[in-house]
Image: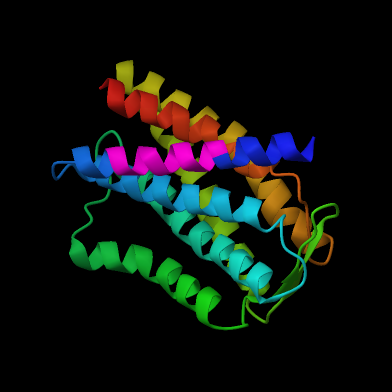
Amino acid sequence: MKTILLTLTYLVGVGELVLAGFFWISHSKNEIRKVMAMLAFSTSIWVITSGLTSYVSQNPTSTFFMRIVFLSGALLVVALLHLTLIYPIQIVRLDKMHGWLLYTPAILFSIISLTSNTIVLGFTGSATDSGRIIPGPLYNLYNFYVFGLYLLAVIILFVRKRRADGIHRRNLNLIFWSVVIGGIPAVVIDLLIPVFTKGVYPNANYGAISTVIWLGVTTYIIVRK
């Protein structure tokens, strides 16, 4: 069963990486497509490295993979929030300065995750059992940040779909439910369970695989337009 889950995980991750390339090549200064490229790229890295943590035991490699998971997770949620602010019509005008302000905390968390022990002190992985995160002092702050941005994105989508009409209302409704249905497994399995089980990180990649739901629905709606 685990082999099947890991195979699906890598297929999803590679597919999302291809999707990121498609959006970047075709963006033609379209901000929505540029943000989708960022969202798909960060999601693909998160998915692939989540799978890679299942193959290694307690050593620096497993810790490095887990730090990449945290790095890409921070970028993923801020890109999702960015998308909710500009699709289908901008509700907040983001010039370069405000764009940097939006992404700065995620970039800082990414740098901290990759270069220090302050978020992930270590990680023990196993091919048969759940891994265990050894949390650093900023571990809970990171989780609060990621969960907060995900929740804010969901709230914004809910408000926007209630206020929209016609085709925009239908599209926003689809995106909202895909983000909720596809995002909850990732939030619960990969974010909340490790917090409440003292770092235990499930090796079943249901959370990573579920990203195909909201990313697939959002891609379909944007490309169809």
Q: Is residue 135 above or below residue 146?
A: below
Q: Where in the figure is residue 89, as x and y percent of width and height?
A: 24, 36
| Image quadrant occupied by the C terminus | top left
Which is more toward the observer, 211 or 88? 211
Q: Is residue 73 above or below residue 113?
A: above
Question: What residue appears at the point 27 percent right and 50 percent down from the top-left corner?
Answer: 92
Q: Where in the figure is residue 162, as x and y percent of width and height?
A: 43, 28
Q: Can residue 157 be seen in this view?
A: yes
Q: Where in the figure is residue 109, as x and y percent of width and height?
A: 49, 72
Q: Is the magenta stretch mostly helix, strand or loop?
A: helix
Question: What residue appears at the point 54 percent right and 53 percent down from the top-left corner?
Answer: 46
Q: Which residue is outermost to the top?
A: 166
Q: Can residue 162 be seen in this view?
A: no
Q: Where in the figure is residue 5, as x and y percent of width and height?
A: 70, 37
Q: In this view, does 31 lie to the left or right of 216?
A: left
Which is more toward the observer, 82 or 2? 2
- Please state the total of marks drawn on the protein image: 0
Magenta stretch bounds: 11-22
Where residue 142 sits, quadrant-wise, is bottom right
Q: Is residue 89 above or below residue 147?
A: above
Q: Does the magenta stretch include residue 222?
A: no
Which is more toward the observer, 159 or 78? 78
Which is more toward the observer, 89 or 48? 48
Where residue 143 sits, quadrant-wise, is bottom right
Where residue 125 sits, quadrant-wise, is bottom right
Q: Is residue 207 left or right of residue 194?
A: left
